[in-house]
Every structure is written in C-alpha cells, then in structure tokens.
Image (cartoon, grey):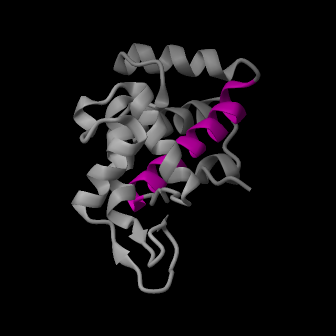
Amino acid sequence: MPRNDKIALIHIAKAKANVCANGSITFNICENQTKLSDEQYRNLLKDITGKHSCSTMTDDDLDKVVKFFQCAGFVKKVEVSQELKARQKTIGVILFLARKVLGDNYESRLESFLFKKTGEFKLYKLDDKQLRQVVGWLRRYGHYQGKNNSDLANGKMR
C-alpha cells in the first residue's frame, strides 16, 4: 500500500476510534465511550512507534500503526459511487461484446484497437467518452459480421 494511503487509513481510523471506560480503543460501541482525543492519539503513536506524528514515521512504522488499528477492529468500508458502478458496467459490456464479436483472441485485438484509437492499452485508463466509443465500435463491427442478435445489439449480459 502506498505511503499516503497508509496515512489516510490511519487518520480515518483515528476519526472513528472510541475509547472505552477501561481505556481500551475500539471501533464498536462500549459503555461510557468517548472519542479518541488528539492527545491520546499522539500518545498512542508514541507507544507504538516512538514518534508523535505520521509524517515522521517510516513505512514500517506506518504498517505497525495500521496493524494496531486493524487488530482493534477497524475495517475501512469502501463506498462505490454511482459513476464508478456505471463505468464498471460499461467495461463489463465491452468485455462481453469483445468475446462475442472478436472471438478467441479478443484480448489482444481489443488492446490493439485501444492503443490505435486512444494511445492506451487498458480499458480502466479510458474516460467515459472513450469507453462509449469502444462499445459503439464493437457493436458496429458485430453488425458488419452479421452477428446482430438481440444480445449483441443491446449489449446485455445474461
């Protein structure tokens, strides 16, 4: 995991951490809980790594802090935006159409087309407009091959 991602994960965990009455840190509900204060957080960092700030820590130190928060029960839930879901669906449609239209060697043929048209080899590097263009190209190519069945025309996966 990159350094900035580790630091972000630690700061998210800090914001969600609770201190129970017995002094333990948890991410669950406990009796008489309070939020982890900045002073408690800095003392915790010092106890784990000997340093008060993430900015002065090595990657190994950051790993120790991340592991501590994970052992305490922190799990980062990733929320997927609607735009990302739509993008993933478009990429799925492209791969489905490519298998149907381009045949067995569809991966290399698709990569060649992508590089020729956009300068990129991978679908995930394309923007939404370019992804829609790839869908259009595959549908047209399938139509010219006479593969214009309802699955191919609609781009639906069953």
Compared across the picture, whether 155 is left or right of 116 comes to right
Q: Residue at x 24, y 30 (%)?
A: 56
User: Is residue 95 or residue 34 the one in the foreground?
Assistant: 34
Where residue 22 sits in the image (x, y, percent)?
48, 74
Q: Is the C terminus in the top left, top right, bottom left or bottom right quadrant?
A: bottom right
Residue 137 vs 153, above or below: the answer is above
Residue 133 appears in the picture as rendered:
no
Residue 98 falls inside the magenta stretch = yes
User: Front-most of 97 and 71?
Assistant: 71
Q: Position of residue 106 (x, y in %)?
A: 67, 22
In the rendered image, residue 42, in percent from the top left (x then y), is placed at 27, 50
| Place of residue 121 in the rendered image (x, y in percent of width and height, measured from the top left) | 47, 18
**Nearest the eye: 145 or 2:** 2
Instruction: Judge left or right: residue 74 versus residue 8.
Output: right
- Residue positioned 41% across, 71% down in the render: 19
Nearer to me, 89 or 103: 89
Q: Main secondary structure of the magenta part?
A: helix
Range of magenta residues: 81-103
Does the magenta portion include 95?
Answer: yes
| In-image side of 108 versus 50 (left or right) | right
